[in-house]
Image (cartoon, helix red, strand yellow):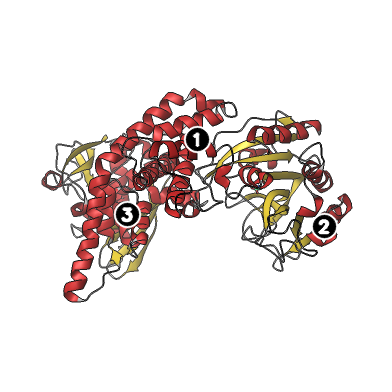
Amino acid sequence: MITSNELRQKYLDFFASKGHKIIPSASLIPENDPTVLFNTAGMQPLIPYLLGQTHPEGTRLADVQKCVRTVDIDEVGDNSHLTFFEMLGNWSLGDYFKKEAIEWSWEFLTSPQWLGLDEKKLSATVFGGDKRFPDIPKDDESADIWKSVGMPKDNVAYMPGGVLESEDNWWGPAGLTGPCGSSSEMFFWQGASDVPPVGSNPATDNDNWLEIWNDVFMQYNKKNNQTFELLNKKNVDTGMGFDRTLRALNGFADIFQIDTLWPLIQKIEEISGREYIENSEVTKSMRIIADHLRTATMVMGDDRKIAPSNVDQGYIVRRMIRRAVRHGKILGIKENFCDKIGAEVIKIFSDVYPEVARNREFIMNEMAKEESKFRNTIEQGLKEFQKLMDGFRIAFEKTGKNVKQISGKQAFKLYDTYGFPLEMTLELANENGLSVDVDSFQEAFKAHQELSRVGAEQKFKGGLADTGEMSVKYHTATHLLNAALRKVLGNHVEQRGSNITAERLRFDFSHPEKLTAEQKAEVERLVNMSIEKNYPVTFAEMTVAEAKAKGAMGLFEDKYGNKVKVYSVGDPEVMPDAHENTLAFSKEICGGPHVDNTGVLGKFRIKKEESVSSGVRRIKAILE
Ligand code: SER
């Protein structure tokens, strides 16, 4: 039996004994990196140093880093997947390389003074080359080092790597570009037999070997898909999946038995009066609750104080809490319970991550608020969902037509009126053998709120969508463009789509033909005129009917709930009209956010005007 505190301490003590400085975990929220929502690996906060900046603590560092990954969120509930996890890591910033990294990994894993694992139960893989990149050689050096330290030679396997895909012994970059390199992964035997059969390794038996640690030999900087340039310094980045290693070392059948999760399961048992092992449905719901509320607590407990919301990290928190509430209902929990689980999470982690204890009050308040808010509508939402099911059934009985899909409009209503995150509707649909028209949901959703969850998810995947200052500017510029197009081309112009990054806006609209050079120039002139006028941008909440009466534009208005937000550029009491010398320039139903005054936008320029489909044109424009 080894506890979480013991494992963390051993790891840090070991690397301190090898001259490493112990650094604290960075925030879960990456700084100055708009490409990801969370730190997903220990190396992420260290990227500037891996790229060559000097670190104040020197060239050998070790730490325990908090991480969140939501890519496998749908798998949570089985016996291994988690959304929050910790990662142990040691770094060489241009200091030691393969030899020391592998020797120390081996010593830490096998020495009786440290983990004392059976050598025969360990295996390693090394980079086997990627045919597309003949200049990056297969890693004979690491294979030789493994054999020299005492790893049984059959337990060392080459894996053909996916340099572009970051697969099989190639790691990184974390975003689209950046530091990366070949890696050597270490595995622990999980098979039924006491020791693995001779010749068994992760290349021949994928299922019974559990990856526990990854030594990355970071010597390239990925510039693009063709170019991998050698870094000035060779670095080492290692990452040990803390939770799964803790599970493996203790021989637990499932990961929820580790001591940073088990007290949560016990608390859920106590609150619900159910037993973890009662049946698979109960087990699954308890696991989802434990995982999700642990993640939500850790994100909210960061000093960035992320509250549940509809954007970015806040959306992930919201999604986690709401999903936990739904699974609480499955267990029959009728009262607010999330903050009680949150309190346990704080207890577990306050010594390791003091910020969680510091932010206790914030976490408890926000969690309770979010749960109450959702509880107020979830019953009605579930009824609404049941009505949909009944409708499908009745239609089937009457007409024989078997509807298998929830429309985007129906899913959007569940989201907008009852607060069901799309993922929850998808889950419910799946449980009922249905699918959801996600594309049309997203259309409705984007219209509702440009800077949306969709953007957030893209970011999480490592795309470059950005909800920072530039995106907000482009969002306002999109309203100006929309208004200018109507003034120049006529009132048939309607928004068909909008996509914003930190670099440009893209706007699709209905219009039958190519714009003439004069029309484009006139649109640009009007937008720039409205920027020069430094109009205030304000919003008011009103019903759809009022919004229409006030001359607001908005394509998807009938999909909105009762009240909508109307953004005005210029005097909100004045109807924007066809003339340029008015007090108001644009009025649109929209979720925001926007800049406060148009004057901050800079100079607007159309880069491209093209056809998207019949009757729909697309403009790409930039602010300079
Ligand atoms: N960056 C590597 C990983 O996340 C090692 O830390 O696996």
Answer with mark 3 or mark 2, whichever residue precedes in sequence.
2
Q: Position of residue 395 (x, y in %)?
A: 19, 69
Q: Residue 317 is drawn in which quadrant? A: top left
Can residue 464 be seen here? The reply is no
Q: Residue 442 is drawn in which quadrant? A: bottom left
Q: Are marks 2 and 1 in contact (CB under 8 Å)?
A: no
Cα gap from disc 3 to disc 1, whole angstroms: 51 Å
Which residue is at the front of the view, 349 or 492? 349
Dot 2, how many residues are within 10 Å of its Cα: few (below 14), some (14-19), or many (20+)?
A: many
Q: Are marks 3 and 2 in contact (CB under 8 Å)?
A: no
**For mark 1, what is the residue?**
298
**For mark 3, what is the residue?**
521
- Left or right, 304 with respect to 500, comes to right
The residue sitting at 18% across, 54% down in the picture is 558
Q: Which mark is residue 275?
A: none
- Tag 2: amino acid: Ala
Which residue is at the front of the view, 102 or 579? 102
Q: Position of residue 27 (x, y in %)?
A: 55, 33
- Tag 1: amino acid: Met
Q: Position of residue 336 (x, y in %)?
A: 34, 35
Cα gap from disc 3 to disc 2, whole angstroms: 64 Å
Can residue 115 be seen here? The reply is yes
